[in-house]
């Protein structure tokens, strides 16, 4: 039997998480989960619980990791805040293609799939989106303090715009849009922010890519 709290259990849970991200909740059977984790059905239930419990566990772990990574990436000095916001949209453009299995965000997958989940899963996703929006809003406010974004702009609305671009680019990537095209979308999304004249004057245009369509 695997120890759900040990190192081996962590590897198993990561494999199960990736299975859910690959095929969604509805498209993932208990046999798929057992195969992904290298377990028999009996061992799976004994160590980790059933499908719904496993989905909530992996979703919660994914959300915690995602929240922490974005909080760390968006935190920093005011003078570099605009660069961190730009890095956010660029990473959004590359997120799916940088994964060897072309897997998207588990949170986005949860929302797009539209399955009637346990209320705890719904609440965990809302919490994750709220926390990421909070990290973005703090970064937007830092850029406003430094004079790179219009101080009169509504910081939460700017954050929501960035999040919408993030989720939209993921869907486009999974539909087959390549990284070059997505990075152009990212640049357009970034240029649509309420940048101040000073910030725009410092931004160098992205060089044209030879042969790109």
Image (cartoon, rainbow, N blue to C red):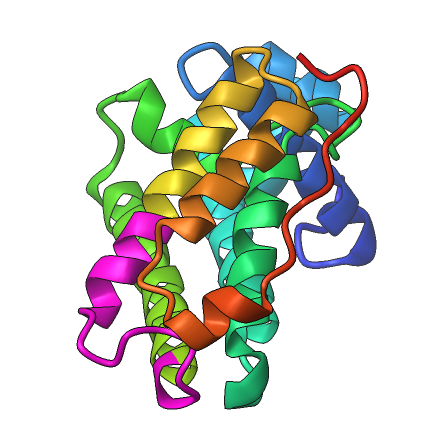
Image position of 137 (left or right of 106): left
Relative to 142, residue 5 above or below: above
Q: Which residues are magenta?
A: 144-162
Question: Does residue 187 appear left or right of residue 100 in this picture?
Answer: left
Residue 147 forms part of the magenta stretch? yes
User: Quarter holding the C terminus?
Assistant: top right
Q: Horizontal and vertical percent for residue 121?
A: 31, 43
Name the foreground residue: 136 vs 210.
210
Q: Do we see residue 174 in this rendering?
A: yes
Residue 46 image position (x, y, % from top left): 59, 36
Horizontal side, residue 79 vs residue 213: left or right:
left
The front one of 204 and 59 is 204
Quadrant (top left, top right, bottom left, bottom right) of the N terminus: top right
Residue sitting at x 37%, y 73%: 140
| Label tally | 0
55 vs 25: above or below:
below
Residue at 46% across, 41% down: 188
Q: Tell me which corner region of the image, top left, top right, bottom left or bottom right, holds residue 112.
A: top left
Q: Which of the 4 image quarters holds residue 144? A: bottom left
Is residue 128 on the magenta stretch?
Answer: no
* Residue 12 in the image, given as x and y percentages of width and height: 73, 38
**Is 41 in front, or is 159?**
159
Position of residue 153 measured from the top left corner of the image (x, y, whole percent): 20, 70
**Residue drawn 60% across and 20% down?**
22
Q: Nearer the viewer, residue 134 or 150?
A: 150
* Residue at 60%, 24% in the rendered image: 181
């Amino acid at each position: 039997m695997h120890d759900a709290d040990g190192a081996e259990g962590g590897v198993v849970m990561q494999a199960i998480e990736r299975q859910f991200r690959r095929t969604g909740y509805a498209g993932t059977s208990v046999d798929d989960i057992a195969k992904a984790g290298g377990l028999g059905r009996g061992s799976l239930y004994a160590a980790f619980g059933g499908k719904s419990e496993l989905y909530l566990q992996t979703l919660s772990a994914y959300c915690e990791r995602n929240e922490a990574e974005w909080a760390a990436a968006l935190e920093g000095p005011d003078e570099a805040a605009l660069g961190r916001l730009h890095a956010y949209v660029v990473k959004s453009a590359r997120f799916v293609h940088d994964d060897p299995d072309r897997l998207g965000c588990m949170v986005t997958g949860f929302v797009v799939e539209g399955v009637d989940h346990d209320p705890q899963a719904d609440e965990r996703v809302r919490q994750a989106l709220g926390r990421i929006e909070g990290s973005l809003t703090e970064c937007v406010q830092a850029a406003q303090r430094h004079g790179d974004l219009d101080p009169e702009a509504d910081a939460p609305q700017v954050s929501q715009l960035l999040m919408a671009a993030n989720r939209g680019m993921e869907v486009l990537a999974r539909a087959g849009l390549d990284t070059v095209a997505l990075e152009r979308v990212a640049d357009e999304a970034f240029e649509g922010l309420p940048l101040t004249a000073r910030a725009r004057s410092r931004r160098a245009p992205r060089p044209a890519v030879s042969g790109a369509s």
